[in-house]
Amino acid sequence: MDGPAEPRTRALWDTYENNISEISEKLSGEYFRYKGIPFPVGIYSPESISITENAEVQDDDIFIITYPKSGTNWMIEILSLILKDGDPSWIRSVPIWKRAPWCETIMGAFSLSDQSSPRLMSSHLPIQLFTKTFFNSKAKVIYMGRNPRDVAVSLYHYSKIAGQLKDPGTPDQFLQNFLKGEVQFGSWFDHIKGWIRMQGKENFLFITYEELQEDLHSSVQRVCQFLGRQLSEEALGSVVAHSAFSAMKANAMSNFTLLPPSLLDQSHGAFLRKGVCGDWKNHFTVAQSEAFDRVYREQMRGMPTFPWDEDPEDASPDPDPSPDPSPSPAQASEHPHP
């Protein structure tokens, strides 16, 4: 953003951040439904979702689309670094929600004029509510999937600190609500089954949290190739290093500590909590695991195999999991991600 556009954009962001403060004081933990999908009151509105549905897309737009708690912010960090050829100055100076603003929020991405090009935007919307003009454009979508068991655990913990979300209740109650799609943005199963239909289109990349965990370097190369951006080995190394969990957790522009406690109360748990794969095994009881597997098998019949579709013998939880184990220093020093 250069020249005369910059003051207007800054004024828009000031209004946006004032709105965040005002909204965060009035959060009710109640949901409304838009075309059958639950959304938290205050952060979203029927109008803001409708604006997104009917917005204009530019051919060089890049969208990060995820079901909540599937690694959205990790991908934002990676893309922020790729777009700057590995230079970390942007991720150290601009809050993550400004780098890839949300489409469907009140005063969402499409209402922020004069964004630099290419526009980087985020969304949790299911495919049937997403911007209609996207589907006849050359704009790109990176859809990031994650083991729904880990998603459920992460969402349960997030619900305890996020002011806009309903109290999750007991783990059992929450798991039942998750399996029925009675959580924000509806059913995980419907979300991934909707978006995976785009696979094979040249402007759609499906990648998983587990693949990034397994080999971040190769995954970053894959994203670069999809975007048509060739980075030097040095720049690639910088992207990988600066998107590590420890780097993001230490970065005030990426760890959400800049948000008011009324919106995100991190005194009761960190937003960037553990960022590991398989943590669900420390939380699910055997009965919960079996119930989840029954629904998963029924819902995902005929779908492709995902990295989390392990051999059932490997997928069983610990027989007596502790309710909320803290990561050991060894875990924390590996390369987990938010």
Image: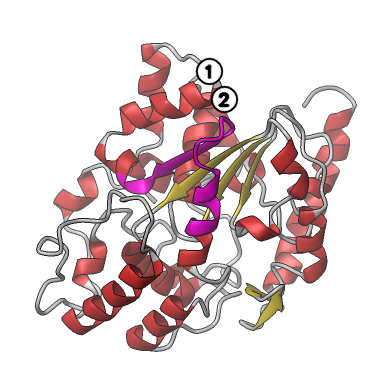
**Kind of element beneath mark 2:** helix
**Kind of element beneath mark 1:** loop
Say which mark, if any, is on residue 83: 2
Q: Nearer the viewer, residue 122 or 115?
A: 122
Q: Nearer the viewer, residue 111 or 293?
A: 293
Tell me residue 25's x, y (percent): 69, 75
Q: Is residue 167 above or below residue 303?
A: below
Task: Check contact, mark 1 vs mark 2: CB within 8 A.
Answer: yes
On-image quarter of the N terminus: top right
Whether the magenta-drawn stretch holds residue 200 is answered as yes
Q: In whole angstroms, how far apart are the C-alphas of marks 1 and 2? A: 8 Å
Q: Earlier in the sequence, mark 1 or mark 2?
A: 2
Magenta part of the chain:
192-210
Extreme residue in the top direction: 232
Say which mark, if any, is on residue 88: none
For disc 1, the marked residue is: 229
Q: Residue at x 15, y 76 (%)?
A: 321
Q: Residue at x 15, y 71 (%)?
A: 317
Tell me residue 115's x, y (percent): 77, 34
Tell me residue 237's x, y (percent): 35, 21
Name the amino acid, label 1. Answer: Arg
- Residue density around tag 1, few if under 14, some if 14–19, many if 20 or more, within 10 Å: few
Q: Residue at x 80, y 44 (%)?
A: 112
Tell me residue 277's x, y (percent): 26, 54
Judge whether residue 37 can be spotted in this image. yes
Name the amino acid, label 2. Answer: Leu
Whether the magenta-drawn stretch holds residue 65 is answered as no
